[in-house]
Image (cartoon, helix red, strand yellow):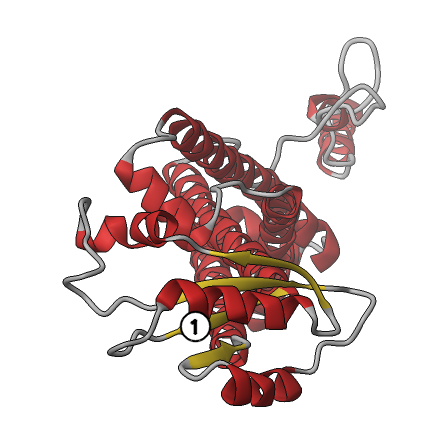
Amino acid sequence: MSGRNGAAPAGRREDDEAPAKTQSPRGGDLRAQSRPAAGPGRRLGPIVPASSVSGTTLVMVIAIMTYLAGLTVGGVDLVRATADDWARDIVRETTIQIRPAEGRDMDASVARVSEIARGTRGVSEVRPYSKAETARLLEPWLGSGLSFDDLPIPRLVVLKLSDATQFDAVAMQAKLEREAPGATLDDHRRFLDRLVAMARTIVWLGVGVLALMLAATVLSVVFATRGAMAGNRDIVQVLHFVGARDGYIAGQFQRRFLRLGLKGGCAGGAAAIATFLTAGLMADQGVGTAAVDQVDALFGRFEVGASAYAGVLSIVLIIAALTSITSRVTVYRTLRAMG
């Protein structure tokens, strides 16, 4: 009996001192078998959800910012191209204005001025405007049926300048004062200076608007990244404290926000390009109407160049890159604040 009594406690002690792991009928540790297999075919789920309300809102914000930035780029390019066309036209031509006076024969004065201009170096073509042509120039502002007897309207002689020979405007003005009283030379220099200043101002305003839009996009991405990290704070903290590298966590957010930036940027860029094409089509269909003719007279033909489309594509890529970089920097700063 003593042997039996002594054997039983010994058996219990062996059970108590056994390792705390459970063997399956086939052998092996059940806890190890319960862990998910980390094989090459298994993919871990993303830290940031694929779709969320904040992600959809961020896509809409990026699309709107890209659209407005694209319109700004197109408008600046259109103004710049128009200013360049005006500058080329102004440099290549000049105008002689003949003011009417009592007892002055305007037709004879126009003929004399044209003769003087043809004999001047640097002038390749002389075109005097007739009464009918001058009336058509003033028709949009003064109406049709204009009578030169009622208004002291000056006559114009347009000079096309040669690219090969230098034109001396000072000598031309002195010759007109001697031989054609009442005629003055307008080389458009003052207008050209104002035009260049206006074009530069518009370009810098466009650059300022683009900078503000990019800054607003960066701030939106910062808030969206912080919101995504707050919504997944438990997962991020666990990964952070068990030793996951900050680069891994930041890369998860960066890839997610890069996709959001590309999605919103492509939507906004496509909308901007569609707006350019629609505006050009409407301008082509409205040729001959009073409104389109006045716009063409002031700004030239509405035509967005290839540089504007290239600018829109650049804006899309820049915004996507800013979205990605901003999210990564924000995640790094938040992780450093945690630990």
Report whether 240 appears left or right of 137.
right
Disc 1 target residue = 97
Q: Is residue 295 visible?
A: yes
Residue 133, x across and y down, in percent = 38, 49
Task: Give the residue drawn at x 41%, y 36%.
Answer: 56
Name the residue nearer the viewer: 3 or 243: 243
Q: Position of residue 129 (x, y in %)?
A: 44, 55
Q: Is residue 33 above or below residue 236?
A: above
Relative image position of residue 253 (x, y in whole percent): 60, 47
In the rendering, at what x and y percent does residue 187 appear?
55, 76
**Residue 205 visible:** no
Work out whether residue 161 or residue 338 is closer to the camera in this orientation and state it: 161
State which quadrant residue 337 falls in: bottom right
Kind of residue at disc 1: Gln
Please tell me which residue lies in front, 204 or 62: 204
Query: Quick check: 246 left or right of 224?
Result: right
Q: Nearer the viewer, residue 183 or 194?
A: 183
Image quadrant in which you'd find residue 262 = top right
The residue lying at 65 percent from left, 64 percent from top is 92
Task: Specify the quadrant that holds the N terminus.
Answer: top right
Q: How many marks?
A: 1
